[in-house]
Image (spheres, helix red, strand yellow):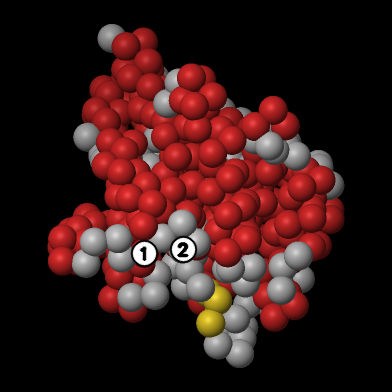
Amino acid sequence: MKLHRMSWCLLGALATGAHAQVTELAHPQWQALYEADQLAQLQRQARTHLAAHRHDPDAVLALALAAEADADQGEVALTQARSCVDQQPQGAPCQLALGMLMSQQVANGSPLTAVRYGAAIGQAFAQAVQAQPAYLPARAALVAFYLNAPRIVGGGADKARAAAAATPPEQAQYAKILRGQIAAHDDQFDQALKEFRSVNAGDDAHLARRLRLARMDFGLALMEDGQGERARAVFAELSKDFPDRAEGFYGLGRCALQAKQFDAAIAQLDQAGNLAGAPTLPIDQRLGEAYAGKGDKHKARQLLERFLKQPGMLKGNVDGARKLLDELG
């Protein structure tokens, strides 16, 4: 089973302190902007900082994170990441940003893009881990690469297991998430759930965030694998554990949509749209699909047209929305 996303949902920064708590960015204000999904402001601040402090690793990583799934912005940030690596080849955040942005280009590009960047993505993540073995975000991204990439460019579940097993002991809770993702890839549903449920996040908000995103990935992968009931159970648990976040309700909406339960899908997606995390999800696209399924073409067109104005959406979602609009006439 393939993970739904490749690397950027796994990104973070240096593990620090006795509890190995992990944040995406060392700069507290930038971290706060990222967690609040204020990506445009994060991008502006990172660019301003880079104008005065060229090749600053944290600013380069901030720029990469701010780009999220926006391929155009990601291509601009990719230039900064390459320059950062040239200046600091052993800089783990620079290598991480480079690998993340190349994987983003693959996700939004043609098969030729995958050929162009495939092996280089894994090399960037591996170099980041080699330079700093305790750098958890690079290890998490490397595991995701191994699970998603074909062997011809360096992928392989055996490599993912080895990378997860080498996680430092102080990051044991994070290692459970990696093992859960590997179990999901191996279609070991019960084992994946066992690993995810065993994670004790405590007061580590960043660990909780990683766990939430990994569980969402798991649910989406199950759904896309045709295991709708199992996916629904994962999302129901996620919405119960994180009632103030959009991910679980969005997943429930996707499951209902797949089952052609259009009214239920609309109810769940509407709820997701009012919660934290909604701006990063293609909620209007899925609502458009639900209304189209109900036969309300006018409402469907409104939602799909609004979705196409939303920045930072993956190419596959954009193409799907445009195709449905053409079909609606």
Residue placed under numbered mark 2 in the picture: 91
Residue drawn 37% across the image and 47% down it: 82
Q: Amino acid at mark 2?
A: Gly
Residue 106, position as x, y percentages in the image: 47, 32
Q: Give whichever of 162, 290 is nearer the camera.
A: 162
In the image, taking residue 47 as reference, residue 227 lies left or right, namely right
Residue drawn 48% across the image and 68% down it: 13
**What element does badge 2 sit on?**
loop
Q: Which mark is residue 57?
A: 1
* Pointers 2 and 1 in contact (C-beta within 8 Å): yes
Q: Give whichever of 266, 233 is nearer the camera.
A: 233
In the image, taking residue 209 as reference, residue 129 lies left or right, namely right
Query: Callout 2: few (<14), some (14-19), or many (20+) C-alpha neighbours within 10 Å?
Result: some
Q: Quadrant of the N terminus?
A: top right
Residue drawn 78% across the image and 43% down it: 157
Residue 91, position as x, y percentages in the image: 46, 63
Q: Is residue 305 visible?
A: yes
**Is 151 situated above or below 38?**
above
Residue 312, position as x, y percentages in the image: 31, 42
Sequence-wise first label, 2 or 1: 1
Q: Which mark is residue 187?
A: none
**Is 104 situated above or below 317?**
below
Q: Amino acid at mark 1?
A: Pro
Q: Give whichever of 156, 214 is nearer the camera.
A: 156
In the image, taking residue 111 as reference, residue 281 lies left or right, namely left
